[in-house]
Amino acid sequence: MSLNPSASQEISGTIGKLAEISSAIAAAVEEQGAATQEISGNVQQAAHGTHMVSANTTNVQRGATETETASSHVLSAAQSLSETATASKLEVAKLLESVRAP
């Protein structure tokens, strides 16, 4: 069975088109693979960034708690100092009054 030249050319043309389509599909798959790898890298960077933000948030929270504790100690010390100053002022007033009295 022999093909006429027109049918043979048509088959060759179809095979050529199939080869072009296959090449285009292969290139698209390769591009999609590269894009997927880039997306994967970006997701890993985002996950790392999220981890860093979480760690920093924990550190800020810890610092805030420590600051709250220190502030409470400073307030307590200031109140104690104020009480001591008031008592000292009263004692000095009594002393001055006793010195002035004949």
Image (spheres, helix red, strand yellow):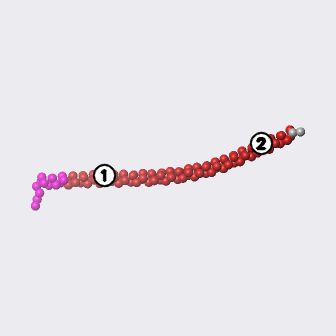
- Check the picture and name the quadrant holding the N terminus: bottom left
As displayed, is residue 90 above or below residue 43? above
In the rendered structure, which amino acid carries the disc numbered 1?
A: Ala
Instruction: Give the residue pinned by disc 1.
Output: 28
Could you tell me how far apart the alpha carbons at marks 1 and 2 are, in whole angstroms? Answer: 88 Å
Find out whether residue 13 is within the magenta segment.
yes
Left or right: residue 101 versus residue 6 is right
Sequence-wise, the earlier of marks 1 and 2 is 1
Is 102 displayed left or right of 54 in the figure? Answer: right
Between 89 and 30, the residue placed more toward the observer is: 89
x and y percentages locating residue 28 in the rendered image: 30, 52
Secondary structure of the residue carrying numbered label 2:
helix
The residue sitting at 77% across, 42% down in the picture is 89
Residue in the picture at 66% in, 47% down = 75
What type is the residue that disc 2 sits on?
Answer: Lys
x and y percent of residue 17 in the render?
21, 52
Q: Which residues are magenta?
A: 1-14
| 74 inside magenta stretch | no
Quadrant hosting residue 82: top right
Specify the principal SS of the magenta part: helix
Q: Residue at x 61, y 51 (%)?
A: 66
Residue underneath mark 2: 89
Could you tell whether 87 is left or right of 64 in the image? Answer: right
Q: Classify mark 1: helix, strand or loop.
A: helix
- The furthest residue to the front: 102
Q: Quadrant of the C terminus?
A: top right
- Looking at the image, which residue is at 69% across and 46% down? 78
